Image (cartoon, grey):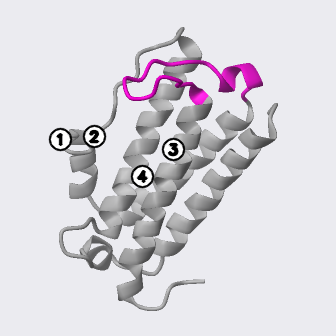
Amino acid sequence: MAHDLHRRIVSRLGEQAHDVRRLTSGLDEETLSKRTMPGKWSLKEILCHLWRVQQIFEERIRAMLAQDNPAVVPYDPEGDPEFDKLVAASPCQDFLAGFLADRERLAAALESLSAAEWHRPGRHPEFPQYDLHFQVEYMQYHEAHHIYQMFQRRAPLGRLPH
């Protein structure tokens, strides 16, 4: 990997995956599905969202590496049938395992990219300067926001795991 910032972003994605594991550990399906804040997603729903976003971003990465400046469609979880399927399915521990396995694969793929590949462009209607680096850094911050939400949702359920 050609740039220190790229290494730090990939490292943070790994750390965040560990945070997701920690904040969901020791809880059964019913507890993970419980909405501890009225009208807000449960831990399970947040996990499903993180996994779904990761899948979409991996598709974008593949497109940006394979095509010249591909169009990138914004993602909205509302009305996404794949997100709805994940939320409706069980058990949550399978989602966690899938998310973590996919994260390891994504991290390895990102670590193997050259500096030029990190800056392969895409066209996003909301962001005029959009490349693979921007997308992965965006993913990191987006995920950090949801991990904070997981922390909030987990706190009413008892002592946080160490």
| Quadrant in which residue 126 is drawn | top left
Of residues 74 and 56, the one drawn nearer to the viewer in this rendering: 74
Mark 3 Cα shell of 10 Å, populated few (<14), some (14-19), many (≥20): some
In the rendered structure, find residue 50 and report the number of the disc placed on it. 4
Q: In the rendering, at what x and y percent does residue 132 appear? A: 58, 28
Name the residue type under label 2: Asp
The magenta-colored residue range is 113-132
Residue occupying the point 51% across, 58% down: 144
Q: Is 134 left, or right, of 87 in this rendering? A: right
Q: Give the distance between the C-alpha atoms of the residues marked 4 and 3, in whole angstroms.
A: 9 Å
On the image, numbered disc 1 is attached to which residue? 79
Name the residue type under label 4: Leu
On the image, numbered disc 3 is attached to which residue? 139
- N-terminal label among 3 and 2: 2
Q: Give the distance between the C-alpha atoms of the residues marked 1 and 4, in whole angstroms.
A: 16 Å
Residue occupying the point 42% across, 49% down: 51
On the image, numbered disc 2 is attached to which residue? 76
Q: Give the distance between the C-alpha atoms of the residues marked 3 and 1, in whole angstroms.
A: 20 Å
Q: Give the distance between the C-alpha atoms of the residues marked 4 and 2, in whole angstroms.
A: 12 Å
Residue occupying the point 54% across, 84% down: 161
Q: In the rendering, at what x and y percent does residue 49 appear? A: 35, 52
Q: Give the distance between the C-alpha atoms of the residues marked 2 and 1, in whole angstroms.
A: 7 Å
Q: In the rendering, at what x and y percent does residue 14 appear? A: 64, 55
Are the residues flagged by discs 2 and 1 in contact, CB closer than 8 Å? Answer: yes
| Quadrant in which residue 24 is drawn | bottom left
In the rendered structure, find residue 69 and report the number of the disc placed on it. none
